[in-house]
Amino acid sequence: MISSAMPRAQRIAACLRVGSVALLLAVTGCGGKTGPGSATGKVTSITVLDYYTDDPEHTQWGDLLTACGKTAGVTVEQTSVPGASLVPKVLQQASSRTLPDLLMLDNPDLQRIAQTGALTPLGQYGIDSSGFAKGILSAGTYEGKVYGLAPDVSTIALFYNKDMLAESGVDVPRTWAELQAAAAELTRPGRYGMAVDANATFEGTWQFLPFLWSNGGDESQLDTPQAAQALQLWVDLVKSGSMSKSVLNWTQADVHDQFVAGRTAMMINGPWRIPALNEDKNLHWGVATIPVPQAGQTPVTPLGGEVWTVPQNNSKARQEKAAQVLACLNDSTNMLTLAEQHFTVPSRPAAAAQYAEQVPSMAAFVESVEAARARTSRLGVKWPEAATGIYTAVQSALTGEQTPQEALKHAQRIATGS
């Protein structure tokens, strides 16, 4: 899982911009039927749209949706489309007045969809949104109202090879200085000390955010000393030979493969990698929170995961049933079930703490989620432009085309469209 990732698939920001007007017109002017059933009469089924196309995830979510549907007294008709197709399909459905009754969105997409008027505030259904971590609630909020809730979430942390660290006499790094020293000590022919995903996508931005945010940087103003210091850290790791220049092209999956093959001793990645890591019985690994600039600071990582929403339609009865299913998905017991199935973090801190005790390898992720930040928390619908500026700056600085300061000045111009 990513995020949005953590990112599962690349979002199509341009399509969102082009479709926003059409979506607003379609939603505000809808009438007649929306999905199966009519505005009146008993509701016996609801429709659901998500991007869980692959098994076992598709089946696991399908089983949970079915169970929650029974609780609400309806059958659930689940449709899953590839991640990159979800938002375009939502725009098309809005224009044809066939939005589903229950809609899953990658959390960075919620703001843009809510802005069009396509979603309903969950407060009108009496859904309890208390007890959620602050960042998680922020991810589902638009203009002060909660439009989406996430049963489980993800973020990223530092994975390390226990055998390599022990052989080199290196402790798990907790600060940037310790990270640089450890990466240098662990680097040798055929092996780098550290690996990240620095490619020219939102996934590359996702991996850089903990370094930007933990140093006090902010995407609302990218050309700051704090942002430049964070980018300089990555530049120094590459220049020193502790990190491969190939990170410019690596995805998170590539970084994982490098780690499993023993070609890097440490990596930044997400908990969705744990099942594959567990399959290699000869690989002894650990996971810790991402190093921070100074000892004692709290890492601020990006929040990944999906939120569930109730779209606008002309049937209040259908919306009420969809809201009941949404509330069921966000029950603490179901949060734990999802976390156990997918190696994610329950969205309620009490459930998350219980999960960390049950699955120690998830403890670093549970700890990080407490302070994790939604990518749209600062800029809302303008986030994609800032994300583009960030990964562009990373590319320019790591190739040596520009200094971190120059690259981030250019990133700020991209983010503001100037």
Image (cartoon, rainbow, N blue to C red):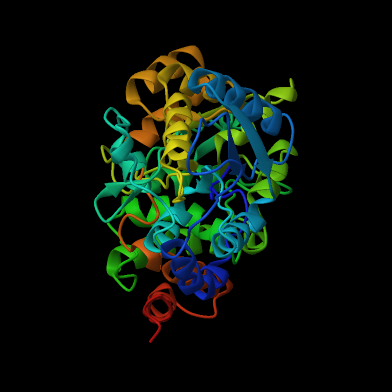
- Residue 61 placement, left or right of 254: left
Please determine whether, in this image, residue 263 is positioned above or below residue 379: above
Q: Nearer the viewer, residue 70 or 293?
A: 70
Q: In the rendering, at what x and y percent does residue 403 appear?
A: 44, 77
Q: Residue 55: x percent and y percent? A: 74, 32
Out of 122 and 177, give the one closest to the viewer.
Answer: 122
Quarter of the image where the C terminus is located: bottom left
What x and y, as percent, mark residue 72? 49, 23
Q: Quadrant of residue 204?
A: bottom right
396 on left or right of 273: left
Q: Is residue 171 visible?
A: no
Residue at 52% of width from left, 72% of height from top?
A: 392
Q: Residue at x 58, y 73 (%)?
A: 399
Q: Residue 10 sits in which quadrant?
A: bottom right
Q: Quadrant of the N terminus?
A: top right
Say left or right for 161 vs 219: right
Q: Nearer the viewer, residue 125 or 379?
A: 125
Q: How many marks?
A: 0
In the displayed orientation, state which residue is furthest to the bottom: 418
Residue shown at the point (39%, 60%) measured from the top left: 117
Q: Residue at x 45, y 16 (%)?
A: 333
Inspect this view and state whether residue 379 appears.
yes
- Give residue 257's position: percent from left, percent from top: 72, 43
Image: 209 above or below 283: below
Relative height, residue 381 to residue 310 (above, below): below
